[in-house]
Image (cartoon, rainbow, N blue to C red):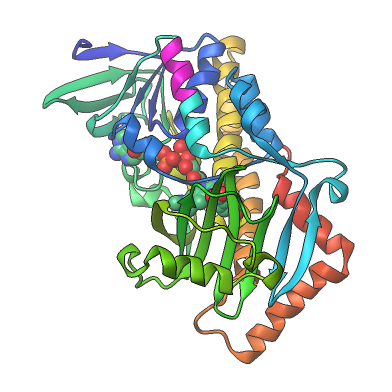
Amino acid sequence: MEANTMRTQVAIIGSGPSGLLLGQLLYRAGIDTIILDRVDRDYILGRIRAGVLEEGTAALMDQAGVGGRMRTEGLPHDGFDLVYDGEIHRIDLANLTGGKRVLVYGQTELTHDLMDARDAEGLLSIYDADNVQPHDYDGAQPYVTYEENGVSKRIDCDFIAGCDGFHGASRASVPASALQVFEKIYPFGWLGMLSQVPPVSDELIYSNHGRGFALCSMRSKTLSRYYVQCSLEDKVEDWSEDRFWDELRRRLPERFADDVVTGPALEMSIAPLRSFVCEPLRFGRLFLAGDAAHIVPPTGAKGLNLAASDVHYLYEALREHYEEKSDAGLDNYSAKALHRVWNAERFSWWMTSMMHRFPDMSDFDRRIQRAEFSQVVQFEAASATLAENYVGMPF
Ligand code: RFL
Ligand code: PHB
């Protein structure tokens, strides 16, 4: 059991991919961290989320010394299929981007690797921490308080990294007058299913069909991750496994529908779709990173990758502060990270707009949406823009 007051250099709130990756990079630079999370490890590892890593994210995992399993078990993907009303158009990522590709490796596995590495180095992570609160980050001596088994504790630190996701305490602690929020809520959700069956295709399939969007993804050659667009009113209990499989097949071109292998669901959950950005990302000695600062709809596979680019900029800034006694990186963090964030926000919004059936779409809207898809099919430059965004802008 730790003492009631501890000290570290960087207190990290949140043990998701952002917090863990930041902790691991800082550790390798000799900078001391404590990570706090309000839930336990199994809960974090039970959340099925992202599946697609940009090369930049994978490179950051290597830099953090935790890329080994990802490099052997991750599946490199050179392209994916976009489908509109049954018409299939392959986005050849590798050819359109001069050889870039993405890596299919689940967020659960990435998180596992980061947690294992932290354990192996004996670094402190505190799980099940109640009422975590950042304090005094406007001054020179910030600290974080929390409760552990009903006992109040305090961590004094130089900086606080707010990596605690969309519903975390970090952004919530900032007075509303000090930040600006940009938000768009989409009128549908994604119902996801994980099943121990071989994926219907070697590559991902994004399909816009009259009945709604469907996505065929995977975690490995024997584990599939599928999604169908659903109503915001839907509850998981409304969806039997059979209904899910039927709906998925109906939204895919015949060529794929006939090949879908069905099996029991290991997990089913509904995620709402939202675009959200908070500006700035820095409040004195508190820095927001990842979902704590921004949310994208999952259609562009950008959420985890944006978390990684924030972490890259924040890590470099903190290293510069300690190693080179320069605060230039800290001063530039917000602007630098937000530039990349807004590019990914645009791409995710655009992919979402092109690939879903919106409940209030007019006939005109539908023709325009189809024309948008046709642009991608007809113009290599349009496909190339899509591909460059999908593989991700350099950090
Ligand atoms: P996380 O993963 O939400 O982790 C935040 C952590 O903070 C903890 N926490 C607190 N701790 C202490 N005190 C508090 N008050 C706290 N409040 C919260 C939480 O318990 C949690 O452990 O945020 P992080 O680290 O910034 O990571 C972001 C990613 O998780 C997220 O962007 C991606 O999952 C988004 N996403 C995808 N991203 C991709 O790059 N590619 C994809 O293919 C992709 N697919 C997806 C996705 C997200 C999805 N859902 C469900 C939202 C697919 C889905 C369905
Ligand atoms: C996933 O595998 O969960 C996944 C893949 C691509 C996306 C979103 C989610 O765009």
Residues rendered magenta in the picture = 114-120
Q: Residue at x 63, y 72 (%)?
A: 208
Q: Please tell me which residue lies in front, 328 or 358.
A: 358
Magenta region, mostly helix, strand or loop? helix
Q: Position of residue 138 (x, y in %)?
A: 37, 31
Count how many numbered circles sit on residues in the image: 0
**Whole-percent x and y of residue 6?**
27, 12
Q: Is residue 371 visible?
A: yes
Q: Quadrant of the N terminus?
A: top left
The residue under the point 66% across, 59% down is 205
* Vertical placement of residue 181 versus 281, above or below: below
Q: If the image is split into quadrants, where does the C terminus sit?
A: top right
Residue 170 horizontal side relative to residue 351, left or right: left
**Which residue is found at the position 61% from the left and 58% from the top?**
348
Residue 169 vertical position relative to residue 255 in the rendered view, above or below: above
* Residue name at image x 83 percent, y 45 percent: 94
Q: Can you see residue 289? A: no
Residue 340, quarter of picture: top right
Q: Is residue 190 above or below residue 37?
A: below
State the image coordinates of residue 175 (x, y, percent, origin top left): 33, 46
In the rendered image, residue 241 lying in the magenta stretch gets the answer no
- Pick the front one: 17 or 229: 229
Is residue 125 shown above or below 337? Answer: above
* Residue farthest toward the bottom in the current orientation of the protein: 363
12 left or right of 210? left
- Residue 173 locus on image (x, y percent): 31, 41
